[in-house]
Amino acid sequence: MRACAMPWHPRERAALLEALSAVGPGAPTCCAGWRTEHLAAHILLREGDPLTAAGIVVPWLAERTERRTQELGDAATGTEDWSQLLATIRRGPPRWHPMSLAGDSVQLLELFVHTEDVRRGRGPTTPRELPAGERAALWSRLRLAARGLYRSSPVGVVLSPEDEAGADLRVRSSPVPGSPAHDVVVRGQVGELVLHAFGRSAVADVEVLGHPDAVATLDAGRPRRD
């Protein structure tokens, strides 16, 4: 019988809670308009309130979801309320919630990115050392999601993970087929590639290679860290 792969999202949940506990409420995050209490509220709503969470993916519900996120976050800045919010996140989604059955396929990238949103809220910081198994799991999930994440890129994009040898992935073809001048290679550790793909390029430690015009075009939409 084939053994099941170890899930890595519980480790990221623990890392997220550690990061939130370290900075407390009122700290900046990489999510525009959100302080740490709003990011924590987002996680709670995503995992515990399906109707409100629907606004994360349904555009016409987005305003209601954002309003609820702001309200819940603003109400959780006191010591006791903040502790209760983190305790609820620590428990994870309730058993009746579909998210309780979700594994790394739904949870890993989400929790990883939000952990880094907290860690890098004040600017770039040293990347975490991730176990080889988690790096492989992140890369597996990113390979499935990357084409959608780069769908609006005006240039071709190849992701090149430094810690997954031989695993370069073309995620978007050049608008001019066969023209290397319109391709860029984004190189870095897998976790940094995840952040770049999810719009956190300003705090991601990556190298962007290619024709200067193509690199500048990509950087215009995804500004890199200084």
Image: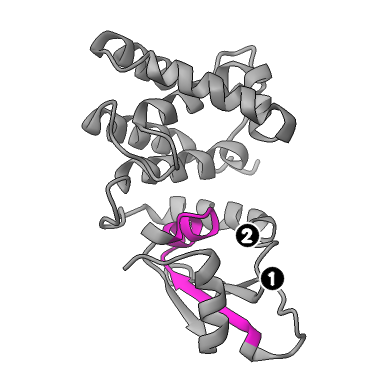
Q: Is residue 123 left or right of residue 200?
A: left
Q: Is residue 98 left or right of residue 67?
A: right
Say which of marks 2 and 1 sits in front.
1
Amino acid identity at mark 1:
Arg
Residue at the spot 75% in from the left edge and 79% down from the top edge: 175
Residue 81 x/y as whole percent: 32, 10
Magenta-colored stretch includes residue 60: no
Residue at the spot 57% in from the left edge and 17% down from the top edge: 48
Residue 188 x/y as whole percent: 42, 69
From the image, tell me which residue sits under label 1. Answer: 172
Give the color scheme: rainbow, by chain, secondary structure or one colour.
Answer: one colour
From the image, tell me which residue sits under label 2. Answer: 143
Marker disc for residue 91: none
The tag earlier along the polypeptide, 2 or 1, is 2
Q: Is residue 200 left or right of residue 175?
A: left
Residue 160 x/y as whole percent: 52, 73
Quarter of the picture containing the N terminus is top right
Magenta-colored stretch includes residue 200: yes
In which image quadrant can residue 170 be found? bottom right
Element carrying mark 1: strand
Element carrying mark 2: helix
In which image quadrant can residue 75 be found? top left
Q: Residues within 10 Å of mark 1 (few under 14, many from 20)?
A: many
Residue at the spot 30% in from the left edge and 53% down from the top edge: 128
Calculate the distance from the C-alpha at mark 2 to the C-alpha at mark 1: 12 Å
Against 112, residue 155 (above or below) is below
Which contiguous range is marked in magenta? 182-201
Against 88, residue 142 (above or below) is below
Quarter of the picture containing the C terminus is bottom left
